[in-house]
Image: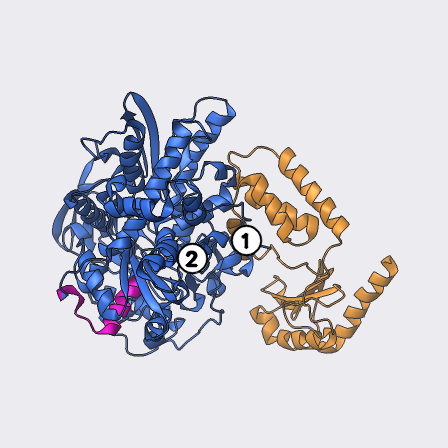
C-alpha cells in the first residue's frame, strides 16, 4: 500500500522548468528596496509555479535573495497559504464554521474521509483529492457547505458526497 | 548628547537616558521585574509576558522589557493585580511544559523552575497540553528537546543574529510553533556549528549540553584505564561560579580536585596553547617574512569557528592556520610524548578534557587528524557545567581544597598560554613569540592591550622593528563576515590585504563566554572572567610561549622543530569545504 500522504512529486523535467521560471522571475522582478522584502512576493510565485514550495525552490530563493533557508522555512510554515507538500488537483475544504458545524459539517468530513480513505490534511495517493477544513465561507444561510477548488456545494448531506467526488473523477477522465 | 528623562517607578524617582526600557530603569532603583524571555545579552523579544507593569494613564498593562521609559511616566511594577496576571501567564506557560524537573538537565538552575517556585505554583490549573516532539541529540554536542521549549526566542536570536548561523528557527505558528532546524531535519544535518550559545542562553531544559559525565566516571572506575585530564584556560575562571565565587582563578584547586577524583596525571590545555603558539607563530613568520603562502593567516583554535568557516567561508581555507587547537595538541601528546616519557601503554590512556565549549565535543572526532597518536587523541570532552555537576557528585569541598601543581611534562604554562581563553588572547600570545622569531630579541613590554576587551572587531598595527603587522580580532560569529569581506574585496581588487593576521573566536568574549560555561553570562561577567585570566598572565614569571622550559624540552626531546615533520604529523590538521545542509 502506498503510505505516502502527499500528492505525487513533480517530474524532474517539470521541476527544472519551474526552477528556471523562478530564477527568471527573481531576476526580472521589479527592484524592491531590499532583497529580504521581496521574499513574500517570491514565495507566492513559487507556490504558483509548483503548487507547493519544494525544497529545491527554497534553495534557489535562498541563494538569489541572500536569505537563510531557515528564515524561508519559518515563513513557509507560518502562513497557511504556503504548502510544503504538493497540493492535490482538487482541494476539498469542509467548512467547520459555527453554522456549518451545527448543521452537520463534521458528518460531511467523516464521510469524505471514508470515501477517499484519507485523513484530514492528507492527499489521495493519485494526487487527485486533498482534504482540509476551512472556517466560515460567508454563506451560513446555505450551511453546511463544502468547497472544492473554486466551486461551492451547499446544503449538503453525507449521501451527496459520493456523487460530488464522482463528478470530479469524471472531469479528470475527460481531460485525459 | 543623550536626553535625560525622569520618571517614577513605584513612587521612586529615576533618572535615565532617553530610550532606556522600563525594565532597565527599574533595575537602577533595585526593582526586579520577572522575565523568562529577556536576557541581558539580547534585545527584548516580548515573548513571555511576565514582565507586565501598570502605567498611569494607560488602560492596559505594558511589557517592561520592550517599553521605553518616557518622561514623567508613573509606573507600578508590583501589586496584587499584577501578581495575579503574572501567575496566570506562568500557569499558561507551564500548561505545555512537562513536569519532568527531577530528570531534567536543568534541574536546579532552570529559570522556569525557579520562577514557578517564586510564584508558588502548586497545580496544573489549565491541565497539560504537552507537545510530542522527538529529542534531537544528533550533533553529540547540544541536545534539543523542543517539548520543553517555552518559545522565548533566545536561542533563535542567538543562532540567527548573534552567531549568524541560522541553524534554528521558529516553524509553524500558534500552538504548533516550535524551534527546529529548517525542514525538521536533524541538527547535525543543519548549518549548526555546535557553538552551544543557544544552550547557554536557554532558560529551560529545551537545549542543553550532551551530558558525557558518565563516560568519565566509567573510565575512572575501569582498572584497565590510565585516566588523564586537561583543563582549558577559560574553565578555571568560571567554575567557581557554580560554587558562589565569580571571577576567581581556581587552577590549582582544579589540579587537586582531579587527583582526588582519581586521575593519574593532570595536564593543562595552556601548555598545548604554548605549543600551538610555537607552531602558529612560525607559520605566521613563514607567510609574513618568507612569503611562503598567502596572507592573512587566520587562527583556527576554535572548533565552532572552524566548522563555520568550512561551511560558510570555505574560500578562506588557504588562510587558515593548519595548527591544531591546544586541546587536541595536549591530547595527541599525552598518547605519544607523555606515554613514552612516563612509560605508559598509550592504548590504556584515557584522555578527558574539561572545556568551556560544546563544540569541543565535536572537535574530538572532527577529522582523521584527531587520531594522530594512533588512537582517538581525546576520549571525552566535558563542559564546565558538566564538571560542576561531577564535583558535586564526588562530594568534594572544592572551594576549600589545598592548592596543587599540574604534572609538568604537559602542564607548565606561560602567561601566553592562559590568555587563549579570552578574545584577543591568541593574537597577543602569537605576537609575543612572532616578535622573537623575527627579531631574535625579547619584548620589553609583552602587553598588546589593543587586542583586549569586548569590542567585537578590534584592529591594530604592531611594529616589529619597523615592519608594520596589521591585525584584526573578531569574536561572535556575526562579526566575522565584515572582516573577511574586507580581505576578499582587497584580493579582488588586487590591493594589499588589509590584515596580516586575524583571530576569530566564535563566542562573544572568546572562550570565557563559551557555550559550555555556567549560565547567566553577561558582558560584566565575561569581563570578570577575562580579567582573572589576564591577572594569571601578569603574575607569571614566564609570559612568552617560546620561553616555556617544558615546551623547549618537548621540541628538543621529541618534536624536533616547529613545522618540522613530526610536529606536522602530530600537531597539524586539514580543512575541507562542508555543505551548509547535509542531504
Which chain is home to disc 1? A
Q: Is residue B16 left or right of residue B348?
A: left
Q: Which residue is mark 1?
A: A73
- Please state, as top left, top right, bottom left or bottom right, where the C terminus of chain B lies in the image: bottom right
Closer-to-camera residue (B560/B116) = B560
The part of the chain drawn in magenta is: B385-400
Q: Which mark is residue B252?
A: none
- Circle 2 — which element? loop
Is A138 situated left or right of B545 in this image? Answer: right
Query: Which x, y percent locates residue A148?
Result: 71, 63
* B399 magenta-colored: yes
Nearest the eye: A104 or B149: B149
Taking the spot 50% from the left edge, 43% from the top edge, the residue there is B312
Which chain does tag 2 point to?
B
- Is residue B405 magenta-colored? no
Question: Which type of secondary structure does the marked residue at label 1 adopt?
Answer: helix
- For the residues tagged 1 and 2, is the chain the same? no
- Vertical position of residue B471 compared to residue B377: above or below: above
Mark nearest the camera among 1 and 2 is 2
Q: Is residue A144 above or below residue A61?
A: below
- Horizontally, residue B120 falls left or right of residue B482, namely left
Q: Which mark is residue B364?
A: 2
Where residue B356 sits: x, y (%)?
A: 31, 55
Mark 1 closeness class: few <14, some 14–19, many ≥20 residues within 10 Å: many
For chain B, the rendered hue is blue
Identity of the residue drawn at 53% across and 45% down: B576
| Marks 1/2: CA–CA distance | 32 Å
Q: Is residue B300 visible?
A: yes
Few, some or many residues within 10 Å of mark 2 (<14, 14–19, 20+): many
Q: Which chain is orange?
A: A
Colour scheme:
by chain
Amino acid at each position: 500500500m502506498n503510505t505516502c500522504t502527499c500528492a505525487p512529486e513533480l517530474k524532474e523535467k517539470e521541476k527544472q522548468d519551474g526552477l528556471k521560471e523562478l530564477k527568471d522571475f527573481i531576476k526580472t522582478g521589479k527592484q524592491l528596496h531590499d532583497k529580504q522584502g521581496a521574499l513574500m512576493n517570491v514565495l507566492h510565485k513559487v507556490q504558483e509555479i509548483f503548487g507547493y514550495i519544494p525544497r529545491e525552490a527554497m534553495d534557489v530563493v535562498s541563494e538569489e535573495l541572500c536569505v537563510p533557508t531557515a528564515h524561508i522555512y519559518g515563513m513557509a510554515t507560518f502562513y497557511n497559504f504556503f504548502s510544503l507538500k504538493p497540493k492535490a488537483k482538487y482541494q476539498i475544504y469542509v467548512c467547520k464554521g459555527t453554522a456549518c458545524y451545527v448543521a452537520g459539517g463534521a458528518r460531511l468530513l467523516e464521510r469524505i474521509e471514508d470515501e477517499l480513505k484519507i485523513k484530514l490534511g492528507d492527499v489521495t495517493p493519485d494526487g487527485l483529492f486533498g482534504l482540509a477544513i476551512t472556517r466560515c465561507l460567508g454563506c451560513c444561510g446555505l450551511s453546511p457547505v463544502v468547497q472544492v477548488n473554486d466551486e461551492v456545494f451547499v446544503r449538503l448531506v453525507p449521501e451527496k458526497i459520493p456523487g460530488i467526488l464522482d463528478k470530479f473523477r469524471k472531469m479528470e477522465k475527460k481531460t485525459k | 548628547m543623550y536626553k535625560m528623562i525622569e520618571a517614577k517607578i513605584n513612587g521612586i524617582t529615576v533618572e535615565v537616558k532617553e530610550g532606556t526600557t522600563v525594565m532597565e530603569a527599574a533595575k537602577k532603583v533595585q526593582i526586579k521585574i520577572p522575565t523568562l524571555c529577556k536576557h541581558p545579552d539580547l534585545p527584548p523579544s516580548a515573548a513571555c509576558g511576565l514582565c507586565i507593569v501598570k502605567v498611569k494613564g494607560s488602560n492596559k498593562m505594558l511589557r517592561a522589557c520592550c517599553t521605553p521609559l518616557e518622561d514623567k511616566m508613573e509606573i507600578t511594577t508590583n501589586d496584587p493585580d499584577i501578581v495575579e496576571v503574572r501567575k496566570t501567564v506562568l500557569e499558561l506557560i507551564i500548561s505545555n511544559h512537562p513536569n519532568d524537573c527531577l530528570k531534567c538537565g536543568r534541574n536546579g538552575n532552570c529559570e522556569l523552575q525557579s520562577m514557578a517556585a517564586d510564584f508558588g505554583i502548586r497545580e496544573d490549573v489549565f491541565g497539560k497540553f504537552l507537545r510530542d516532539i522527538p529529542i534531537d541529540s544528533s550533533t553529540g554536542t547540544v541536545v534539543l528537546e523542543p517539548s520543553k521549549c517555552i518559545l522565548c526566542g533566545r536561542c533563535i536570536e542567538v543562532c540567527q543574529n548573534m552567531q549568524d548561523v541560522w541553524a534554528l528557527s521558529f516553524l509553524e505558528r500558534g500552538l504548533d510553533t516550535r524551534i527546529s532546524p529548517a525542514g525538521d531535519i536533524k541538527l547535525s544535518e543543519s548549518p549548526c556549528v555546535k557553538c552551544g550559545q543557544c544552550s547557554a542562553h536557554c532558560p529551560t531544559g529545551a537545549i542543553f549540553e550532551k551530558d558525557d559525565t558518565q563516560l568519565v566516571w566509567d573510565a575512572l572506575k575501569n582498572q584497565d584505564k590510565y585516566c588523564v585530564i586537561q583543563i582549558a584556560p577559560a574553565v578555571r575562571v568560571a567554575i567557581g561560579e557554580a560554587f558562589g565565587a565569580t571571577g576567581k582563578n581556581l587552577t590549582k584547586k582544579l589540579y587537586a580536585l582531579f587527583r582526588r577524583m582519581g586521575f593519574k596525571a593532570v595536564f593543562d590545555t595552556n601548555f598545548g596553547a604554548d605549543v600551538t603558539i610555537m607552531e602558529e607563530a612560525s607559520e605566521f613568520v613563514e607567510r609574513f617574512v618568507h612569503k611562503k603562502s598567502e596572507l592573512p593567516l587566520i587562527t583556527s583554535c576554535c572548533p565552532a569557528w572552524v566548522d563555520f568557516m568550512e561551511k560558510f567561508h570555505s574560500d578562506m581555507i588557504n588562510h587558515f592556520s593548519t595548527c591544531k587547537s591546544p586541546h587536541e595538541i595536549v591530547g595527541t601528546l599525552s598518547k605519544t610524548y607523555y606515554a613514552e616519557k612516563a612509560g605508559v601503554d598509550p592504548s590504556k590512556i584515557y584522555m578527558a578534557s574539561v572545556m568551556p565549549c560544546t563544540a569541543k565535543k565535536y572537535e574530538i572526532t572532527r577529522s582523521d587528524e584527531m587520531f594522530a597518536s594512533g588512537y582517538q587523541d581525546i576520549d571525552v570532552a566535558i563542559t564546565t557545567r558538566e564538571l560542576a555537576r561531577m564535583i558535586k557528585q564526588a562530594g568534594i569541598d572544592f572551594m576549600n581544597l589545598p592548592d596543587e601543581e599540574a604534572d609538568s611534562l604537559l602542564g607548565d604554562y606561560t602567561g601566553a598560554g592562559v590568555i587563549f581563553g579570552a578574545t584577543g588572547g591568541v593574537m597577543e600570545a602569537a605576537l609575543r613569540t612572532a616578535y622573537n622569531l623575527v627579531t631574535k630579541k625579547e619584548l620589553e613590554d609583552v602587553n598588546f592591550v589593543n587586542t583586549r576587551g569586548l569590542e567585537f572587531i578590534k584592529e591594530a598595527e604592531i611594529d616589529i622593528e619597523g615592519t608594520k603587522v596589521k591585525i584584526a580580532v573578531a569574536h561572535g560569529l556575526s562579526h566575522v563576515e565584515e572582516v573577511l569581506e574586507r580581505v576578499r574585496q582587497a584580493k579582488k581588487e588586487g590591493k594589499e590585504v588589509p590584515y596580516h593576521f586575524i583571530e576569530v573566536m566564535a563566542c562573544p568574549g572568546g572562550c570565557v563566554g563559551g557555550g559550555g560555561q555556567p549560565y547567566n553570562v553577561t558582558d560584566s561577567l565575561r569581563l570578570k572572567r577575562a580579567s582573572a585570566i589576564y591577572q594569571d598572565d601578569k603574575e607569571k614569571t614566564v609570559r612568552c610561549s617560546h620561553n616555556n622550559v617544558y615546551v623547549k624540552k618537548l621540541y628538543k626531546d621529541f618534536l624536533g622543530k616547529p613545522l618540522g615533520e613530526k610536529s606536522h604529523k602530530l600537531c597539524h590538521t586539514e580543512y575541507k569545504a562542508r555543505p551548509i545542509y547535509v542531504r
